[in-house]
């Protein structure tokens, strides 16, 4: 039993969680009681996600600073930044266009057969209009301590880039500090290893709490919308894997095997942040040098949310179709370009996709009340979005590493993976000396 891989434990936990949730839903028809019970069950998943969030700031800072310091100069940093951003913008555009095309082809909002919320109803989401001023002021931290305290990944990345470049410029004088921050990154990864042991319990609690409140019946009501969206995600995965295949060849399938735990974890907890440490580990085993993965991954979490991007166009068109509002091709293209910008400006906002969608509905005079239609199943959709974001960022990191010549050959990567497994086994056998 001990040899059962973590991915299998997560899968078992998901199934048990669904069963427990369904039993609670069936035993307590009163939604208020079921929600109360689900609140207690979800304590475990809340604790797990809080522990992950506790690690993200120091982990991003330490790995990114060391990575940039090892790159050696600002020119290398700028080159990797440009390549990563090129990939992110292209992937975002493809995701948005795919959502637009599929929503037009599949027409998920037509003949819905569900009562529509009153046009005057509000989803109570912040829908402030996006401005360049807001984006720039959000990008630059007022204080590094504040950025760390609020887990603002984008702001941590900006500070870490300055810090890493300055440290590299110091040469020999900075070696002691580089070594100290490198040690900090190892400590953070060690703590991550301990936290990850709670993953199956967190997955069980998250699934049980979701199903206890909503039941599985809600999935039948929205079967067409959810089915169409997940079909879209499958198409997007195929496009991402195809793009990865162009640059990495058949080796891309090895990467998919390595990230399966991260994929399932982000799916079950509906949080791509939960998978961040697992993806870093998978990329190490795949042969991506840490100086690339520690740079591209945090940027990806702000700029490369492929699943969320596709959901934005798909959901806006679904709501417009439900209210029988026709949007011309020109309007849809305008909407796509606005979403391309607003989605970048709202990185780090909780349930960012819904906030972006609410703002877009306002701009195009589509009833915001339409959001109430999808709020009930949003958690189930968020699972797919989060898992897709995790896949997209993994592939982006591997491709940028290949472009930079920082991807180990397969034989070296396999040796590196064996070394990491050996270190993990030693830690398990002698935790006191780890």
Image: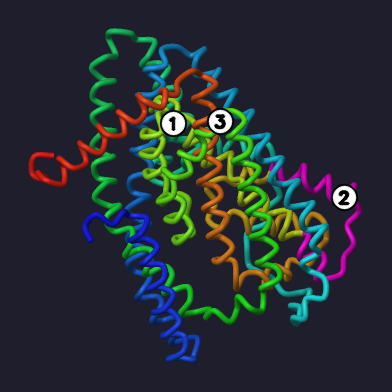
Q: Secondary structure at mark 3?
A: helix
Task: Classify the position of the C terminus by image quarter.
Answer: top left
Q: Are marks 2 and 3 in contact (CB under 8 Å)?
A: no
Residue 383 coordinates in the image, percent (x, y): 53, 60
Q: Are marks 1 and 2 in contact (CB under 8 Å)?
A: no
Q: Which disc number belongs to residue 293?
A: 1
Residue 124 coordinates in the image, percent (x, y): 63, 67
Q: Give the foreground label among 3 and 1.
A: 3
Mark found first going from the N terminus, 2 or 3? 3
Choose between 145 and 78: the one closer to the eye: 78
Residue, x 29% and y 46% (percent of image)? 192
Q: Quadrant of residue 291?
A: top left
Would residue 102 appear left or right of 296 to someone viewing this image?
A: right
In the image, which residues are magenta?
317-341
Q: Quadrant of residue 67?
A: top left
As measured in the structure, the alpha-carbon distance from the residue carrying label 2 to the one carrying label 3 is 38 Å
Q: Which residue corresponds to mark 3?
A: 249
Q: How many marks?
A: 3
Residue 394 coordinates in the image, percent (x, y): 49, 39
Q: Which disc number belongs to residue 371?
A: none
334 falls in the magenta region: yes
Helix, strand or loop: magenta stretch? helix
Q: Which residue corresponds to mark 2?
A: 331
Residue, x 40% and y 29% (percent of image)? 287
As measured in the structure, the alpha-carbon distance from the residue carrying label 1 to the one carrying label 2 is 38 Å
Choose between 392 and 327: the one closer to the eye: 392
Q: Secondary structure at mark 2?
A: helix
- Would you place residue 178 above or below residue 433 in this image? above
Residue 202 coordinates in the image, percent (x, y): 35, 63
Mark 1 neighbour class, 10 Å CA radius: few under 14, some 14 to 19, many 20 or more: many
């Amino acid at each position: 039993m001990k040899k059962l891989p973590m991915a299998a434990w997560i899968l078992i936990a998901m199934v048990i969680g669904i069963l427990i949730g369904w039993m609670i839903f069936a035993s307590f028809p009163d939604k208020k009681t079921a929600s109360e019970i689900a609140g207690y069950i979800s304590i475990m998943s809340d604790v797990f996600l809080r522990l992950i969030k506790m690690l993200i700031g120091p982990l991003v800072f330490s790995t990114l600073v060391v990575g940039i310091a090892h790159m050696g100069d600002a020119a290398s940093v700028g080159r990797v930044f440009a390549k990563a951003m090129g990939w992110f913008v292209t992937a975002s555009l493809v995701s948005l266009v795919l959502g637009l095309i599929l929503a037009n082809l599949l027409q998920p909002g037509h003949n819905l057969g569900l009562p529509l919320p009153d046009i005057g109803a509000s989803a109570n989401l912040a829908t402030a209009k996006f401005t360049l001023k807001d984006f720039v002021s959000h990008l630059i931290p007022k204080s590094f301590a504040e950025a760390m305290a609020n887990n603002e990944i984008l702001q941590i990345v900006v500070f870490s880039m300055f810090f890493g470049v300055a440290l590299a410029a110091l040469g020999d004088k900075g070696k002691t500090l580089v070594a100290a921050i490198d040690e900090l990154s190892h400590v953070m990864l060690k703590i991550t290893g301990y936290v990850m042991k709670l993953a199956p319990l967190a997955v069980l609690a998250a699934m049980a709490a979701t199903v206890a409140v909503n039941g599985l019946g809600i999935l039948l009501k929205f079967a067409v919308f959810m089915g169409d969206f997940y079909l879209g995600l499958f198409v997007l995965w195929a496009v991402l894997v195809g793009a990865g295949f162009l640059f990495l060849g058949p080796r891309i399938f090895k990467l998919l095997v390595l990230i399966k735990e991260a994929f399932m974890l982000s799916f079950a907890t509906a949080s791509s942040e939960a998978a961040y440490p697992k993806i870093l580990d998978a990329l190490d085993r795949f042969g991506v040098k840490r100086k690339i993965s520690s740079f591209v991954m945090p940027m990806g979490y702000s700029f490369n949310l492929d699943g969320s991007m596709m959901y934005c166009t798909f959901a806006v068109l679904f709501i417009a179709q439900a209210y029988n509002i026709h949007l011309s091709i020109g309007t849809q293209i305008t909407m796509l370009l606005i979403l391309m910008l607003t989605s970048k400006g709202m990185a780090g906002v909780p349930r960012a996709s819904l906030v972006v969608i609410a703002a877009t509905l306002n701009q195009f005079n589509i009833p915001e009340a339409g959001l109430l239609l999808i709020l009930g199943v949003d958690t189930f959709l968020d699972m797919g979005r989060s898992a897709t974001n995790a896949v997209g960022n993994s592939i982006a990191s591997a491709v940028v590493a290949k472009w930079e010549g920082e991807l180990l050959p397969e034989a070296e990567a396999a040796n590196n993976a064996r070394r990491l497994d050996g270190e993990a086994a030693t830690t398990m056998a002698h935790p006191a000396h780890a």
